[in-house]
Image: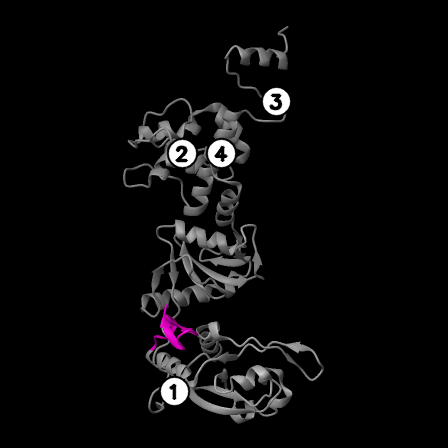
Amino acid sequence: MAKAFTEEDGALLEELGVEIETKREGSRTPREERIIAGFEEIQRFVEEHGRWPQHGEDRDIFERLYAVRLDRLRELEDARTLLAPLDHQGLLSAGSQAGTSIPDEIDDDELLAQLGVDVPSASAITELRHVRTAAEKREAEEIANREKCEDFGRFKPLFQQVQKELDAGVRQTRPFELKAEIRPGSWFIVGGQKAYVAEVGELFTNAQGRTDARLRVIFDNGTQSNMLMRSLQRALNKDAAGRRITDPEAGPLFSGEREQDDQASGTIYVLRSKSDHPLVSANRDLVHKIGVTNMNVEQRIAGARLQPTFLMADVEVVATYDLFNINRTKLENLIHRVFGPARLEIEIKDRFGNPVVPREWFLVPLFAINEAVERIKDGTITRYVYDPATARLQRQ
């Protein structure tokens, strides 16, 4: 009967310079761990691209590497046995696709060499592939791990509309910039798929001291992911084909005369407050409320002194602009985004003494609001944001 291998034997062999590969009960050997990790990379490729990795010089180098690796795993009986419980995609069932000479051991550097890629001993490719931090692995998993979107039916028309607007030139695709805003309603292209940010959770500060939030992102293949905002940003920056999809150009909203077929949509109104609040009193000519309504403006401001949204005070109408064929809610959100840097931070008590923070008041001069209206008319407003330092709209 063979003698059991003891820890003392292992220590002695180690002192003699003999390398051994041990396998404790319930654990895997380093070689098995390498095989599983390599197979999981192939699985993620298949999930992302919807197909097996292919051979060919016109393919991405990593796709070629995965294709060769998969061929070798199919040939190794012990690898097939090890991976069978994990092979939910049926990757091991097909035969080899390549006529490439493959080394006996699964080593990525050797495989790359077989593919004609010169890899230095301290290869950046190897380091990036094998020395990822736990945070990087979690981010990659967030992008790759998606689930079925059960209510995709209500999002599908949005994807169809966006594609029509791209085809018509109403929307454009632009390279993603790290500082680009990710907000509800944003559209992107990542991993070759259109992605819609349906929801943005509460902002929080992550371990690195940066602002982050949990997103609900819907993809055009009917899947969704609850990834972090920072994870999506990094995925877009790492993806050479990653793009943001611009908002629709506003188009000429106002004309000198109303056309016969125009549908009335409402009114942009600009108000000045008569509040005696110290902050308002000190900046009376700069503090303006900008809103959009489908009501008569006089009706909208009736009883202003009883409403915290009007600072619990009477107001005067400074300017109005009639709208035609426009989505009022989207336009109001757009205007508030443009003037967001100058939003008035003020807390008002309502009739019951509860604190309320109105969100539609801004510290901006009337001429800047008029300039914004002109930008809305010529359809360029989405390219601008208000700069409080110069009291002007600045191109983004």
**Above or below, 357 relative to 1:** below
Identify the residue position indicated by label 1 in the image: 262
Residue 273: x, y in percent?
54, 88
For image coordinates 50% across by 88% down, the residue present is 271
| Residue found at the far top of this picture | 1
Residue named by callout 4? 37
- Above or below for 215 versus 263: above
What span is in magenta?
A: 379-396
Seen at 58% across and 58% down, the residue is 204
Closer to the chain start, of discs 4 and 3, is 3
Q: Can you say which quadrant of the picture contains the C terminus? A: bottom left
Q: Which residue does the numbered mark 2 point to in the structure image?
A: 126
Query: Type of residue at label 1?
Result: Asp
Q: CA distance from mark 1 to mark 3?
A: 77 Å
288 or 60: nearer the eye? 288
Which type of secondary structure does the marked residue at label 2 adopt? helix
**Numbered disc in front, either 2 or 4:** 2
Instruction: Say if 388 sits above or below 113 in the image.
Output: below
Q: Amino acid at mark 3?
A: Arg
Quarter of the rendering containing residue 356: bottom right
Q: CA distance from mark 4 to mark 3?
A: 19 Å
In the image, which is nearer the foreground, mark 2 or mark 1? 2
The residue that mark 3 highlights is 24
Between the residue at mark 2 and the residue at mark 4, the CA separation in whole angstroms equals 14 Å
Q: Amino acid at mark 4?
A: Ala
Asked which secondary structure carries label 3, the reply is loop
Q: Is residue 66 visible?
A: no
